[in-house]
Structure formats: structure tokens, C-alpha cells
């Protein structure tokens, strides 16, 4: 009986460790997927920013101020 109990305890500890490592691997896989998705979105965001900056410079030959009061004052 003592030997069976020892085997059961060892099996439980092994299963607990295996579960810990599996959960850890899954969370790292999810993090890698999130990073990959954000990296894939970067070229589109860079293109949009370049277009916006180019529009600012071609509109007034200077960047447009964010504050309307200052922007109207400078006109």
C-alpha cells in the first residue's frame, strides 16, 4: 500500500509539473502570435503615417498644428 501511495504521489507531482510547463508554453505561443500580428500591421501603419505627413506638407508647406486656436492664429 505504501508503494502504491508513493507511486501515486510521484505521478501527481509529475502531472502538476507537466501542466505548469504546458500552460507556460501556451502563453508564450500566444504572445508570439500577438507580436507577429502587430509586426504584420506595421507596414500599413507606416504607409498611412507617411501619407498623412505628405498631405500636411503639401497642404501648407508646413505641418498642421493640432490646436485650432494656434492654427487659426497662424493663418
Image (spheres, rainbow, N blue to C red):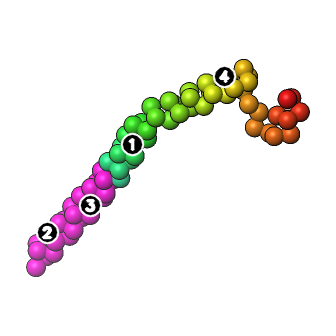
Residue that mark 3 sits on: 19
Residue drawn where x is 16% and y is 71% of the image: 8
The Cα–Cα distance between marks 2 and 1, rounded to whole angstroms, is 45 Å
**Looking at the image, is mark 4 or mark 2 earlier in the sequence?**
2
Q: Pointers 4 and 2 in contact (CB under 8 A)? A: no
Give the Cα distance between marks 1 and 3.
27 Å
Classified by dominant secondary structure, the portion drawn in magenta counts as helix
Q: Which residues are magenta?
A: 1-26
For the residues labelled 1 and 4, the Cα–Cα distance comes to 32 Å
Taking the magenta stretch, the answer to whether it contains residue 18 is yes
For marks 2 and 1, give the one nearer the viewer.
Answer: 1
Earlier along the polypeptide chain: callout 3 or callout 2?
2
For the residues labelled 4 and 2, the Cα–Cα distance comes to 77 Å
* Residue 7 within the segment the image draws in magenta: yes
Q: Look at the numbered disc 1 and give the secondary structure of its residue.
A: helix
In this view, the mark in front (4 or 2): 4
Q: Residue furthest bottom?
A: 1
Which label's residue is closer to the chain start, 4 or 3?
A: 3
Q: Which residue is mark 4?
A: 58
- Residue behind mark 1: 37
Amino acid at each position: 500500500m505504501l508503494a502504491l501511495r508513493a507511486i501515486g504521489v510521484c505521478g501527481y507531482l509529475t502531472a502538476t509539473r507537466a501542466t505548469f510547463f504546458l500552460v507556460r508554453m501556451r502563453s508564450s505561443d500566444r504572445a508570439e502570435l500577438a507580436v507577429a500580428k502587430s509586426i504584420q500591421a506595421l507596414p500599413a501603419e507606416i504607409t498611412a503615417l507617411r501619407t498623412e505627413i505628405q498631405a500636411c506638407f503639401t497642404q501648407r508647406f508646413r505641418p498642421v498644428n493640432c490646436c485650432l486656436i494656434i492654427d487659426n492664429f497662424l493663418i
